[in-house]
Amino acid sequence: MLVRKIPDGTVIDHVPAGKALSVLRLLGDPQENGFTIAMVMNVNSSKMNRKDIVKVEGMEVSPEQVQRLALIAPRASVNIVRSYRVVAKKNAVPPRTLRGVLNCTAPTCVSVREKESAPSIFFLSGRSPLRYRCKYCGRELAEKEISSQLG
Ligand code: CTP
Ligand code: ZN
């Protein structure tokens, strides 16, 4: 392997190729808070064509972070490592409702025209591929639009 095993922390595997940096940003850039990060980008995977892997040494991600992760890496597996062993393997679960996270792409939508009185609300409408539907106008955002909005 390109990167050694970590003694403790989190390994986020099966991240879509090119999304490793977005995953780090979503986790709050732990490297800026003193954590050591390892990333593997664009490796071959049996489950998907190409993938990235993100390892954060010494930090266990929270359930909320695992949920948000599902938005940019819907098929990611989150491995919690303690004493070199994987003690928990979680799949990122997309939240049913998103408030103030996504922007509707319909120019006439009330959530676009009147942001103050109609804050953005989206409901999960598909998991694979990921889809969210605007509460106000019904516009659906596709997986690509969702991950591009989240950086
Ligand atoms: N890993 C690590 N450090 C450890 C233990 C595991 O960096 N001390 C990494 C592995 O390299 C792998 C991921 O965590 O990328 C998941 O580990 P494991 O469950 O042992 O691997 P697989 O069985 O291949 O995982 P999956 O079935 O999810 O593909
Ligand atoms: Zn809308």
Image: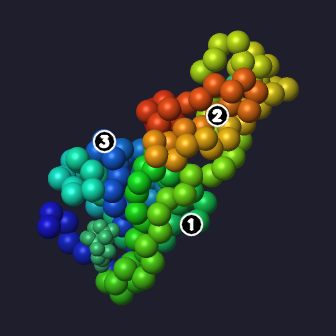
The answer to whether residue 126 is above or below residue 6 is: above
Amino acid under disc 3: Gly
Q: What's the CA distance linking mark 2 and mark 3?
A: 25 Å
Is residue 32 shown to the viewer in this render? no
Helix or strand or loop: what does disc 1 sit on? loop
Q: Position of residue 34 (x, y in %)?
A: 42, 64
Q: Residue tagged by mark 2?
A: 133
**Front position among marks 2 and 3:** 2
Q: Crowding near pointer 2: few (<14 within 10 Å), some, many (20+)?
A: many
Q: Secondary structure at mark 2?
A: strand
Whether the residues at callouts 2 and 3 have beta carbons within 8 Å, the answer is no
State the SS at label 3.
Answer: loop
Using the numbered discs, state the Cα–Cα distance from disc 2 to disc 1 in whole angstroms. 26 Å
Please state the horizontal and vertical placement of residue 92, each as a whole percent of the image: 49, 59
Which is more foreground, mark 2 or mark 1? 2
Residue indicated by mark 3: 18
- For marks 1 and 3, the one nearer the N-term is 3
Q: Is residue 115 above or below residue 150?
A: above
The residue sitting at the top extreme is: 108
Q: How many residues crowd around disc 3 within 10 Å: few (fewer than 14), some, or many (20 or more)?
A: few
Classify residue 63 as left or right of residue 113: left
What amino acid type is highlighted by mark number 1?
Answer: Ser
The quadrant of the image that shows the N terminus is bottom left
**Badge 1, how many Cα within 10 Å: few under 14, some, many 20+?**
few
| Earlier sequence position, callout 2 versus callout 1 | 1
Residue 42 in the image: state x and y as whole percent.
21, 47
